[in-house]
Image (cartoon, rainbow, N blue to C red):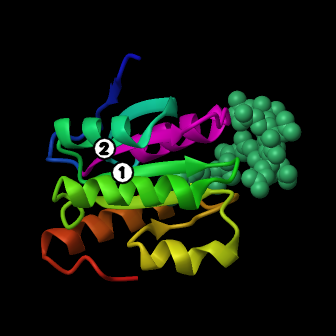
Amino acid sequence: MRIIRARPVAEHKAVKVLLAKLGLDDHTRPLYVLAQGLRDAGLEVIFLGTHNTPERVVRVALEEDVDAITLSFHTLGHIGWLTEVMGLLRVREAAERVAVFAGGIIPEDDWPTLAAMGVKGFHGPGTPVATIAEGVRREVERKKKGQGEGP
Ligand code: B12
């Protein structure tokens, strides 16, 4: 699959995120809305699209040296997928460096489990993309200062 790069207009070094869906989830619209909105907010977006595996997401994230992985979920399975992604990042010794965000349709009951794994975000329908971008930016800053365990 082709990787599409969306660079922000500004020339300063932007926060770089990989945006993807895992498995058979075909809700593409949220991905397009997020890709455009995050890019408009000044982030650089590596757009992987749908039908990815955790291995592919982590491999491309490390090859592209992204600051954060942003994964969108609309057909459940997020706990299993995110367990795999976080495990692969730990194996590659990148869990401290790369922030992981999840959002979409994620039941509130699952938030504590995901938070305990180190996943951030959980924003659902109606969240302004600017709010999501700000959250990603803040977490990336925290990680860079070695304080990645914030809310
Ligand atoms: C449109 C839609 C579809 C379209 C998708 C078209 C497309 N190309 O995208 C079609 C008709 C194909 C579809 C199919 C299905 N759908 Co559908 N779909 C929807 C619907 C109505 C809207 C989704 C949407 O586009 N919203 C607009 C975008 C912009 O908003 P958003 O997705 O909420 O994204 C925002 C936030 O959630 C957040 N966000 C999203 N991702 C991420 C990621 C990160 C990292 C962060 C931080 C934030 C974030 O930011 C966005 C901006 O605010 C929702 C209902 C709903 N109200 O959400 C159901 C819904 C998601 N679908 C659902 C279901 C069940 C299905 C099907 C399984 C139905 C079926 N039995 O066939 C299939 C699955 C097909 C598949 N293989 O994926 C369920 C999911 C239930 C669940 N997961 O618990 C929902 C919630 C409907 C419902 N209430 O039951 N669907």
> Is the residue marked 1 within 8 Å of ligand 1, measured from its CB?
no
Residue numbers of the magenta segment: 15-40
**How crowded is the residue under tag 2: few (<14 C-alpha within 10 Å), some, or many (20+)?**
many
**How many discs appear?**
2
Give the SS element for disc 1.
strand
62 inside magenta stretch: no
Q: In the rendered structure, which disc, 2 or 1, sits on the residue that comes first in sequence?
A: 2
Q: Which residue is mark 2?
A: 58
Type of the residue with mark 2: Val
* The stretch drawn in magenta includes residue 30: yes
Determine contact: label 2, label 1, CB under 8 Å. Answer: yes
- The Cα–Cα distance between marks 2 and 1, rounded to whole angstroms, is 8 Å
In this rendering, would 105 be left or right of 102? Answer: right
Q: Quadrant of ligand 1?
A: top right
Q: Quadrant of residue 58?
A: top left
Residue 24 position, x and y percent, is 63, 34
Q: At 57% across and 37% down in the image, what residue appears? A: 23
Residue 69 bears which disc, if any? 1
Picture quarter with the C terminus: bottom left
The N terminus: image quadrant: top left
Up the image or down, 147 lies above or below 46; here it is below
Q: Quadrant of residue 124?
A: bottom right
